[in-house]
Amino acid sequence: MLQSLFSKLTSELLVEITQQELRIYSLTSDTKYIDEPLIAVEVEGDKETIKAMGRASKNCIGPGLKIINPFKHNRSMISSFTYAEKILQFAFKSIQTNTFRAAPRVIMHQLEKNEGGLTEVEERLLIELAMSAGAREVVVYQGNRINPKHETFESIKARANAS
């Protein structure tokens, strides 16, 4: 009975990251979050204030305002851990509408800049990023795109651990 109650309160999320788009699918419901990985930050002296996330960032104007894509860099997928964390926190809250939800179990799937596989450092970065954004368990998946309607967290975790 307790397990059944917990399964209704928990969520399992698939996070697909590219430089142009962040896609988060719930594996336990039909909810999804799809947006550009942008963050608008206003800088006044030493103080930074987040003004907008996603496509809405493009509409922000003002002095001291900078629009950042923390998932865009010449050599690696993540250029700013702090801003990437803020975007994931926002996206997790957006997709989890129930205020009594437990921290989600998350599958991180980097869809670009993964030729030859991810290094141990890149895998650790994805795990730490998801954990700091609020995940309670993280699996880094490498491979073909996942169909969130036909997969479960456990099936993807088993495939990721087998490779």
Image: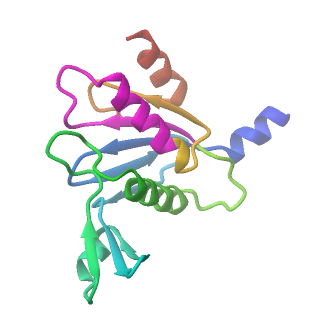
Q: Where is 82 relative to 12, above or below? A: below
Q: Residue at x 36, y 23 (%)?
A: 120
Q: Residue at x 50, y 57 (%)?
A: 89
Q: Between 2 and 139, which is closer to the camera in this rendering?
A: 139
In the picture, which quadrant includes the N terminus?
top right
Residue at the farthest left position: 74
Q: Is residue 98 visible?
A: yes
Residue at the farthest right position: 1
Q: Residue at x 21, y 51 (%)?
A: 72
**x, y (%) of residue 12?**
55, 40
Residue at the farthest top position: 162
Is 50 displayed left or right of 62 in the figure? right
Is 155 displayed left or right of 142 in the figure? right
Q: Where is 82 relative to 108, above or below? A: below
Q: Between 121 and 95, which is closer to the camera in this rendering?
A: 121
Q: Where is 163 relative to 37, above or below? A: above
Q: Where is 98 relative to 23, above or below? A: below
How many circles with numbers are drawn on the protein?
Answer: 0
**x, y (%) of residue 65?**
28, 81
Q: Which residues are magenta?
A: 105-130
Q: Is residue 150 visible?
A: no
| Residue 117 part of the magenta segment | yes
**x, y (%) of residue 135?**
57, 43
Residue at the farthest front position: 45
| Residue 120 part of the magenta segment | yes
In the picture, which quadrant includes the C terminus?
top left
Q: Residue at x 46, y 44 (%)?
A: 129
